[in-house]
Image: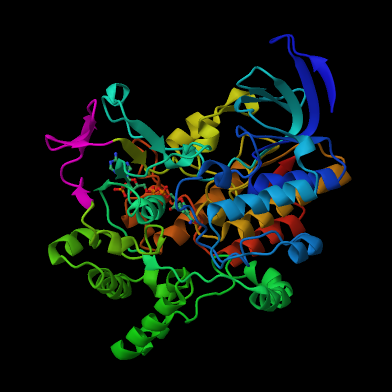
Amino acid sequence: MSTAVSPATDQAVAEYDAVVIGAGIAGLYQLYRLREMGLRVCALDAAADVGGTWYWNCYPGARVDSHSYVYQYWFSEELLQEWNWQERFPAQPETERYLRFVADKFDLRKDIRFNRRVVSARWDDHARRWTLITEGGEVLRTQFFISCAGMLSAPLVPPFPGHERYRGVIAHTARWPRAGLDLTGKRVGVVGTGATGIQVIQTIAGQVAELKVFQRTPQYAVAMRNDRYDDAARAALRARYPELRAKVRNTFAGFATDFAYQPGEYYRMTPQQRREALEKLWAEGSLDFWLGGFPELVTDPAASEEVSEFVRGKIRARIQDPVLAEKLVPYSYGFGTYRVPLETGYYDVFNRDNVELVDVRQTPISGFTENGLVVGGREYELDVVVLATGFDAGTGALTRMDVHGREGRSLSDLWHRDIRSTLGLQVHGFPNLFTVAGPLAPSTAFCNMTTCLQYQVDWVTDCVAWLRDHGHTAIEPTAEKEQEWVKHHDEVAAATLMMRTTSWYTGANIEGKPRRLLSYIGGAGNYHRICDEVKASGYAGFEVA
Ligand code: NAP
C-alpha cells in the first residue's frame, strides 16, 4: 500500500492493486489468493470480525444446510487435516469458528479493515482505477475492485408503519445482536417462515412464553438428519476429501452428489417405484431430496405436483390439528421452486400450546402499536418481534453502494432497470469490477456456496494474473458477450418452473425489482466448464486495455 492525499476529501488516499469487499467465505479466500500473487491487497468489511453471513446471522438456530464435508475450503491440505468438523450440518457458531480459524492460520486479519462500510465506488476512465470511499470518509484507490459482499447480505426490512412507537425489541435475523438476545419467558413474534424463520421458530418455541408465527407463504421443509461426528467418522470423510474436492466442481449444485436419476427416468418408473425412490431420498435428510434426485422436479409440472404432494403428506402427518395442517401445507407453488429449507422439529412446534400460527396471506400485517403487531384489527402483544424477512438478494449488496463505472454510469440504475451480468462475474461498462456471487451465476442460489465461491475466486485470480502477465491494465465484457450470457441464462431459466414462484429467487420479494431468475440454473458443473472455456480462449468476448 502507498498513500497520497485526496483533494476532494482531504483524507489520505491508500493505493492498492486490489480491494476486496467482504471478509466472509469468498472474501477471505480472495484476499489469500491475491496476496499469494504478491499484490498490494486489502479487504474491507462492515463487520467487526470475519465471517460474513456467519458473522451477521447469529440468530438462534442458525445452521448450514450443506454437509460440512463439502462446505469448506479445499486450497490447503494442512487446513483440511487440522480442522475437525463436529456435525454433519454445523451450527452458526461452529462455522464462524472455522472462518476465524482460517483467518488466524493464514494471518489474514492484518490485511482486513473491519468496521468499514463502502458507500461509494467510482471508476476513473483516465487513471483506469477505482476510488472507494467508506462511511467514515476513508479513501482507497485500486486497480481491481472485487466485490465478495455476498448474495444474501442486504437485509429486507418490511416498512411496517408505527415501528418507532413500538416499545419492545425488533431484531432482524441478519442483524442479530452479537451479545445475544434473551428470549426466555418472553412473548415473541416471528415474521417470515423461509429457511431462516424456520430455524428460529423450531429453536425458540420451547424457550419462550408465547410464540406467534406470522406466516405469509408456507414452505416445503425437508426433515434434516444431522449426525455428530466422532474421530472414526471424520477419518472416513478425510479419506474421501481428494475425491470430494474434484467431484463438487462438476455436480449440478456443487454438492457431493448429483441427480441420482437421468432425465426421463421418472416416467419410466411405476408410481410405486417413484414413491420408494422418494422415500429413500427423504431418508437422506438433506437437500439431496431436492438436488440429488430427479431433475424433472423443477422442470415438469406433473412431476413437480407429484413430489409436492409427497412432501405435503409428510407435513400433514406431523400436525395434530388437520385444519392447522392445511395452513402449513403449500399449494401455491411447486416443491423446489422456492429455496427448500431443512427442518428439525419445525412442524411439531405447531402442536404446542404456546405457539400460534397467524396467517397473514389474506390479511397482511398492518403495522406496529406500542405493544406489538396488528393483523386484521387484532393486536398481538409482543415483547420481541423477530424479522426473518429475508434479503434484497443478488444485487442488494452492490446497489446499496453507489457504484459508478465507465462514463459515470450507475450500477444501481442499471440493475434497477434490468439485472444483467456476464457469467455473474463482470458487468459491461464496469471495468475491473469483479462480482463474486453476483447475479446470474449459480453462486447466487443454486450451488453449495463454498464450491461456487471458490471457483469464482479462482477465476478472478487467474484473470488478474493473466492481465498482468500480458501487460494489460483493465478488462470488461463487451455488450455482445453480456447479451449472449443473459440470453443463455434466460433460456435455461425458461425451461424450468422457477419463474412461476414468488420468492427472492426471481427478485419478486422486493417491490419494483426487475424480474429475472437471479441464479444461473444450468448447473454448477456446466457453468464451471463455460468459465474455463472463456479463460482458455484468452477471455474472448472481453475487452482489454
Ligand atoms: P426468505 O426465504 O426470503 O424468507 C423471508 C420470509 O419473510 C418469507 O416467509 C416471506 O414471505 C416473509 N416476509 C417478507 N416480508 C413479509 C411481510 N411484509 N409480511 C409477512 N411476511 C413477510 O428469507 P430467509 O428465510 O432469510 O432465507 C433467505 C435465504 O438465505 C434462503 O433461501 C437460503 O438460501 C439462505 N439461508 C440459508 C440457510 C442455511 O444454509 N441453513 C439458513 C437460512 C437462510 P413470502 O414468502 O410470502 O414472501
Q: Quadrant of residue 140 in the image?
A: top right
Residue 163 location (% of width, % of height) = 30, 26
Rendered position, 518 above or below 11: below
Rendered position, 492 above or below 360: below
Residue 427 falls left or right of residue 385? right
Residue 466 location (% of width, % of height) = 82, 48
Residue 456 location (% of width, % of height) = 67, 53
In depth, the one of 239 and 150 nearer the eye is: 239
In depth, the one of 295 and 5 nearer the eye is: 5
Residue 34 location (% of width, % of height) = 80, 44
Tell whether position 174 is magenta.
no
Residue 469 falls left or right of residue 413? right
Residue 456 appears in view: no
Residue in view at x 46 percent, y 71 percent:
225
Q: Which residues are magenta?
A: 355-382
In depth, the one of 232 and 307 nearer the eye is: 232
Rendered position, 257 above or below 195: below
Quarter of the image for the N terminus: give it: top right
